[in-house]
Amino acid sequence: MSIAFLIIALVTLGSAAVAMSLRNLIHSALLLIASWAGIAAFYLWAGAEFVAFAQLLVYVGAVSMVVLFAVLLTRQSRVDMAIAPDALRRIVAALLAGGATLGVLFGAVVSAPLPIAASATPVTVSVRQMGQELMGTHAAALLIVGALLTVALLGAIILASTGREDPPGVAPPAVAPPTRKTS
Amino acid sequence: MTLVQLSRVTPGVSDWFFQSLSSPFIAAAGDSRLERLPIIARDLLTSRLPEPWRWWLNSLLAILVVLFGFAILFALLTLVERKVLGRVQNRPGPNRTGLPFTKLRLFGLGQPLADGIKMLTKEDIVPRSADKLLHFLAPVALLAFSILTFAVLPFGRNLVPVELDAGILYFFAAGAGTELAVFMAGWASRNKYSLLAAMRALAQLISYELPLLLSFVPVIMMAGTLSTTGVVEAQAGWKFGFIPHWHVLTPWGFAAFVIFMVSALAESNRSPFDLPEAESELIAGHLTEYSGFKYALFFMAEYFGMCALSAMAVTLFLGGWRAPLPFLEIVPSYVWFALKLFALLFGFIWIRATFPRLRIDQLTRFAWKFLVPMALINLGTAAFWSLTCNWSGPLQLARWAIALALVAGPFVVMGRKLSRDYAPRTYRYA
């Protein structure tokens, strides 16, 4: 437990916590991305260089864009931006989804066989070995992650496209520009 | 074997960041005094210091040299760009501003300085309804991300600021952050043109990120390493004593190089892909609400990104700091690197002067329907090239023929198919 680890943990968890409490969805999304970058920093701290850079490339580079596009495309007006946990149904659904995810992850982490005795000299792994591991032993995991990301992307597109279904031939209603609060 | 263990590739991560310029000397042909000049100069400054301090100062020196070197290159590049553009368009370009406090005019060499002072003294305007924090953070983040990419570039023999085992991955991971900065700039400006342009810029950056990443995968496949020095090492030597083993001189390498450079043009928002800052349609896009020094920072980041991607192209395909011919090795490696870098940068400027800007639909169609399939096919070509590496004699000719056909065939077929409904064009009003 070093100071670096504490700082990384603080940044990761802190930005995630603040992201949940903010009303502005864009700010939340950006803080979520900061949290992902924190996770990448943790991988780096743990000595997993490849995973850290892959995390940065995939999450900060690509998934962040999916999130931001989803936020901008699904929110039609600024009134829609603020979401309050008003309905009981919503709370229950959130707790169920969160609990299920936590259960699955916790179960996986606890039941995973981890070799405790790490060798004193760090293993050097070549790109070839890494590729063979990813395409052989962990091929299923890789495919599942790929399918998951594709489904998420398709979901974002469907969410964005079902928002405005105008009957053909009818001009879209004139939408008043969102009013801005000038302070 | 878990993934975390799998990627445990370096001994100590605590020292990965400042492990600067400290790789051991490689006794090679070009290990002359001139070649080691930067390291000798550094040692003159820091050799008297005790160990931890020396290491810190060495790292600091490396950072300062890279920062100042590229800042000066940026300043000169703006002038060179304007001069070359002027030459192409048959006008002199900036030639009035001389060196300060002298009567020397020197073809307008003082122009970057004057531009810098102008940018610094301009009023910094922030829209009243803008998101103040993000509006400020966007140029800073953009510049920071583009400076980070310089860390792993091998500028010469033993001249790598940070020696990383996953260096190439680091380069592109750091570059991925620029998209975020563009979004922040567009959204924080609270201006519909900015937001629209930022979304358009994101669509472009994401589209071209894919061929960019796919085009260097063959290089990693052939070199068998993700480290930048390893890739340069893989391109050592000459065939028949005069053809260098550069990746660009193989069929797959040539295709990958062209795809890489086209994607690099788009990634650095350079013409003919400079839609994000389209002055005429979107009033400079996400830069609309920026003025003064922040605007200058955006341009600095653009030039830095261009330099970094060109330097990466030199490293991946053009043999890095290696000399093209054996007897030319007396010229130090960093000079060769600089020459190749300048050649590519000049190419960027030349392209800007020559080609008209694309439309957004042409741009995305080109990326998804042409560059991505070409890059994927090129992966297959590289695999073929790698599998047939021990063919010899007449089989060597067959190897070249098949590989060339694998590159040229899809290029012709897809190019025809893509431009069937669009070319040849007739311009009625032009």
Image (cartoon, grey):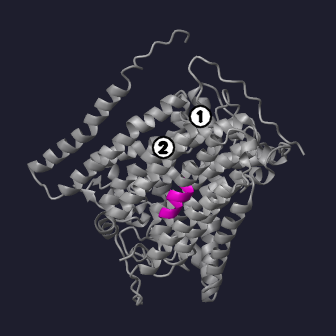
Residue A77 is covered by the magenta coloring: no
Write the start and end of the magenta stretch as one range. A54-61
Q: Mark 1 near mark 2, Cβ–Cβ under 8 Å?
A: no
Q: For the residue labelled by badge 1, is the local secondary structure a helix, a strand or a loop?
A: loop
Residue at the far top in the pictured view: B428
Q: Quarter of the image containing the C terminus of chain B?
A: top right
Find residue B356 and report its horizontal and vertical position in percent. Answer: 54, 27
Q: For the residue labelled by badge 2, is the local secondary structure a helix, a strand or a loop?
A: helix
| Residue bearing the label numbered 1 | B275
Q: Is residue B362 visible?
A: yes
Find residue B142 and report its horizontal and vertical position in percent. Answer: 65, 53
Residue sitting nearer the eye, A29 or B42 = A29
| Image quadrant in which you'd find residue B126 | top right
Q: Is residue A14 above or below residue B306?
A: below
First reached walking from the N terminus: tag 1 or tag 2: 2
| Residue bearing the label numbered 2 | B208
| Residue at 39% across, 35% down | B369
Q: Amino acid at mark 2?
A: Tyr
| Residue at 69% across, 61% down | A19
Q: Residues within 10 Å of mark 2 (few under 14, many from 20)?
A: many
Q: Residues within 10 Å of mark 1 (few under 14, many from 20)?
A: many
Mark 1 to mark 2: distance in Å? 13 Å
- Main SS of the magenta part reads helix
Find residue B93 and report its horizontal and vertical position in percent. Answer: 66, 32
